[in-house]
Image (tube, grey):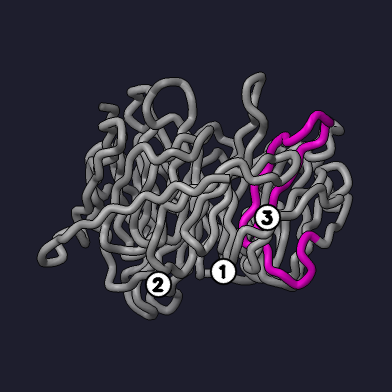
Amino acid sequence: MRVVTALVALVVAGGLLAVAGYGLVGADGATLSASWVSDTGRQISSNHHAVAVADGSVYAPISGADGSDRCALVAIDAESGATTWRYGIPPANCTIHSVADPAVADVTGDGAPEVVAATTEKEVTGFDPEDGEVTFRHGLSDYGYTKPVVADIAPAPGEELVVADVTGTVFVVGADGTERWTYAFDEYVWSQPVVADFDSDGEPELLVAGKSGTAVLFSGNGSVEWRSAVADGDAVTWATTGQADDDAALEAVFSTVDGDAVAVDGSDGDVEWRRNVGEFAAVNAFSAGGPDAAATVYVTSKDGRVRALDAETGAVRWTTEVVTERVQMMPPPSLGDVDGDGAAELVAPGNDGSVTVLDPATGDVVATYARDAPIFAPATLSDADGDGTSEAYVIYADGRVVRLKYEAS
């Protein structure tokens, strides 16, 4: 196992980089630079919910100081960075989780997408993507923390909206606003719920994990298919899924506060492997592999390192240190084709304000960008301009969103 350290010493006068940031030239001459930085800055450093990108717009969940009028869901033009509309959260509800990760999907079944997000108004709300007009509201038992999921999971016709609030109540809601079923975990849920056919029975299931370290797989009608003690008493904070081995069932990989990455079999919840990578482990990117590459899970931890783990065994393939200073945590990396060669790259935000592009096969650093503000959320990768390459949209803790473009040498 090798460790690659990307260390660049820069002297910057007057704090200019707080807004503008800077790109560093990679070993092969590649650069990662900002096309724009949004004007959504706030006088706090706690924004940590990722943006959504769809149909030429970026939807940014922005939090402000408690009790202020600075909390909002903000729509930003993906090409220019200009704000096109905003939905303000009432000051009484304005706090760091005022708007959770948004999604864009057809929730109401009318053939047109909505922007949907859970908020501290204790509801999940749908918005017209063009002008921000509220199209629906559904009450929750607490504020939302994770991104809503839209999928055909329940036995009733059509797709459902699936949302878990922060205290663990799961709501499955039909396009007509009727609750298909609910389930109360009675514990905090911070990791993203996932809908997929985990046990390969031809029907989708819902997987949710909570603060106690327990993961539960629900069938479409809300019955429990299995319950697994992923990490006894160790909070699950991130989750990802994919096919890790040669059986039909999917695997789910969870990461915990104490630093475990844990893979479980989707058919029965049995733990397949466990590896400790250090405090505040975070997973998101899962590559399926292929004829020339095995399936891989990419995980970060508080030590500033990105690790590639064999998805079938948990063995470490490579380790790259992308942050050298002491940080609070590390967001998980994302996979996407940022150079247009048809293969995915790994984009790893650092809590120090850096964003690093890595070769997912080797861990080599390809390009880096940085701003003088922390990052707590993963990058959203999307080809919003239709040029065949994905851009990285990163929300910083100060509320500014940065659009990053990779340029080869």
Q: Which residue is mark 1?
A: 143
Q: Which residues are magenta?
A: 230-255
In which quarter of the view is residue 256 placed? bottom right
Give the residue displayed 50% in from the left and 62% down from the top: 303
The mark nearer the N terminus, 3 or 2, is 2
In which quarter of the view is residue 265 placed? top right
As displayed, is residue 200 above or below residue 253? above
| Residue 243 x, y percent position in the rendering | 72, 34
Judging depth in this view, the residue of 325 and 334 nearest the camera is 325
What is the three-letter code of the residue carrying label 1?
Tyr
Judging depth in this view, the residue of 202 and 32 nearest the camera is 32
Of all residues shown, which one is farthest toward the left?
Answer: 13
Real-space CA distance between mark 3 and mark 2, rounded to the nearest whole angstrom = 38 Å
Q: Report whether 214 appears left or right of 342.
A: right
What is the three-letter code of the residue carrying label 2?
Pro
Residue 28 is tagged as: none
| SS for dot 1 | loop
Which-is-in-front pick, marks 3 and 1? Answer: 3
Residue 135 visible in the picture: no
What is the three-letter code of the residue carrying label 3?
Ala
As displayed, is residue 195 above or below residue 165? above
Give the residue displayed 41% in from the left and 61% down from the top: 351
| Residue 223 x, y percent position in the rendering | 87, 53
Judging depth in this view, the residue of 238 and 66 nearest the camera is 238
Real-space CA distance between mark 3 and mark 1, rounded to the nearest whole angstrom = 27 Å
Q: Which residue is mark 3?
A: 261
Which-is-in-front pick, marks 3 and 2? Answer: 3
Q: Which residue is mark 2?
A: 90
Judging depth in this view, the residue of 107 and 285 nearest the camera is 285
Disc 3 crowd, CA 10 A, few/some/many (<14, 14-19, 20+): many
Give the residue displayed 60% in from the left and 63% down from the top: 278
